Amino acid sequence: MSVNPAWAGMTRPGHSRGLLDVWSRRYLLRLLVRKDMQVRYRGSVLGWAWSYVKPAFQFLVYFIAMGVFLGLNKSLPNYPVYLFSGLVIMNYFNEAFMNSTRSVIDNTALVKKIYLPRELFPVSSVIIAFVNFFPQLVVLMAAAILVGYHPTVLQVGFILLSILIITILAMGLGLIFGAINVSLRDSQNIVELIMMFTTWLSPVLYNAALVDHVFPGWALILYNLNPITGAVGLIHLGAWAPTTSQDPATMALVGPHILIYGLAALVTSLVILLLGELVFRKLEKNFAQDL
Amino acid sequence: MPKISDAATVQAASRPAIVLDHVHKDFHLRHTHSMKETFVAWLKKKPIADDFTAIEDLSLTIEEGESVALLGLNGSGKSTTLKLVSGVLQPTSGTVLTRGRVAGLIEVGAGFHPDLSGRENVFLNAAILGMTREETEAKFDDIVAFSEIGRFIDTEVKFYSSGMFVRLAFAVAIHTQMDILLVDEVLAVGDEPFQKKCLQKIRDFHDSGKTVVVVTHDLGAAQRVCERGVLLDHGRVILDGTSKQAVERLRAGE
């Protein structure tokens, strides 16, 4: 690039600083999130109650199938709390991941006509998923208190760490799949496929000890290195374990080394977020012409 | 988001506001939109994409305070040029530079949501165009007055007539605080009195020392609003002079 002194102080339009730009446009981010909240259940009688009805029925179905028919309710103390804590964190992941994957193409009109930091769209999707998740977390806490919840500060910290991991992970994956989705719509189908087995590939419905007995060592390590497994384990430690007697036999149900795998999950998520940022910025240049 | 230049620096003038230096823009036209199609095309050894050159070695400098009409027939690269300046598109090679805050009337209504009220849409769209809440609140009454929406401002936008919708969208865009205004084919907005009001607003904007770039097929309006005219053909500049010269050359059938 030739340097012309008259060009001093000029900027290149459309050059993004990625997530930093999202921070500098946080007022717009807030309005985008609010728009989605206002529009989401418009025209429905139950409105925001749907955010409770759906997880309630989901919980009921799994509880009857897994808890009653397959007898987990007897082998796991406070199985409803165990099940629900895994389900809410999983729902948060699935919603954040799916919405952020679709977020760029859902905002085609804006992307094609005006330059905005495009990461605003996946970021706002994750925030909206969080807003939807939060009341479920409150219900979970209420249920835990009902059956006798006595956590330590550290255990509450595990819940927050679990939420942090899922947020970073969903954000990173959403950036990757959302960017690819612009030119290849297979991306959102792959995400749907992934969601079909995320709930089953982590100890949400069953306890981690069951996996230990079946999987050979290397498969078990792979299973545990799944960052979602780490996050689910952490929320069990934080929300479910303090409702039990916490004797070694009960704690074994969460799985050994869960803290190590939890930290591994945090590292993995951060790497995926970094990767997502790189992929998004690489593909972003062509969004306006590919949509 | 660049800050608005203050009046003093605008008066100093004769600094470039927009620079396009040897800009090329190729479009990669993909024929496939799924992995299956890509795979099948690869098996059949069919090309999966064509390249199409929209802008070829375009160099253009627009000084602060100028009003420029980009003219040309369909497909001459006018709108692509404007999208390069606004940052929606990136050049394949070459450099595009701008000074200060750029906003365009190209995106009229792009961020409007039918289920939100006029008022909510004004705030959302002003934010999309880079305004803060304080700036929007300060301009809100002007925006509503300009749009002639009046008491319907709290009605959901889906109940608006198309004219009301466009007027409100335009009113938000024209009240955005910026240094460079880009206008793409929106001079045909609303009824005639409203069009006149819009043209006047664009002229006022230019009179206050800001830079205006207009893309339009309305040659009369282009000549009235702009001093300088740049005629494009197949992505190259073929004439750079007064808007009158450019319009005459275009009418002559070049």
Image (tube, helix red, strand yellow):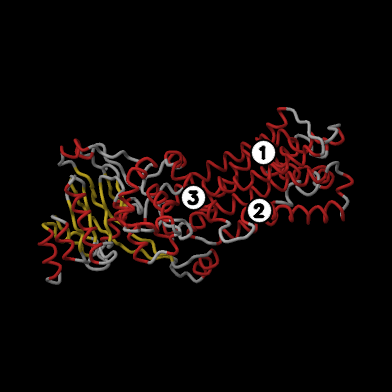
The residue closer to the viewer here, A67 or A271, is A67
Disc 3 target residue: A121
The residue closer to the viewer here, A180 or A236, is A236
Q: Amino acid at mark 3?
A: Phe
Q: Amino acid at mark 1?
A: Ser
- Kindly check if marks 3 and 2 are in contact, taking CB atoms under 8 A apart as contact: no
- Answer with mark 3 or mark 2, whichever residue precedes in sequence: 2
Task: Single out the residue that lies furthest toward the top.
Answer: A153
> Dot 1: within a 10 Å radius of its alpha carbon, few (fewer than 14), some, or many (20 or more) residues?
many
| Apparent side of residue B1 relative to residue B233 in the rendered image (left or right) | right
Q: Quadrant of residue B107?
A: bottom left
CA separation in Å, label 1 and label 3 = 23 Å
Q: Secondary structure at mark 1?
A: helix
Instruction: Tell me, for residue A250, which label it has, or none.
Output: none
Q: Chain of mark 2?
A: A
Instruction: Tell me, for residue A49, which label it has, or none.
Output: 2
Please identify, in this view, whether the residue under mark 1 or under mark 2 is nearer the observer. Answer: 2
Q: Chain of mark 1?
A: A
Disc 1 target residue: A162
Could you confirm whether marks 1 and 3 are on the same chain? yes
Residue drawn 74% across the image and 56% down it: A57
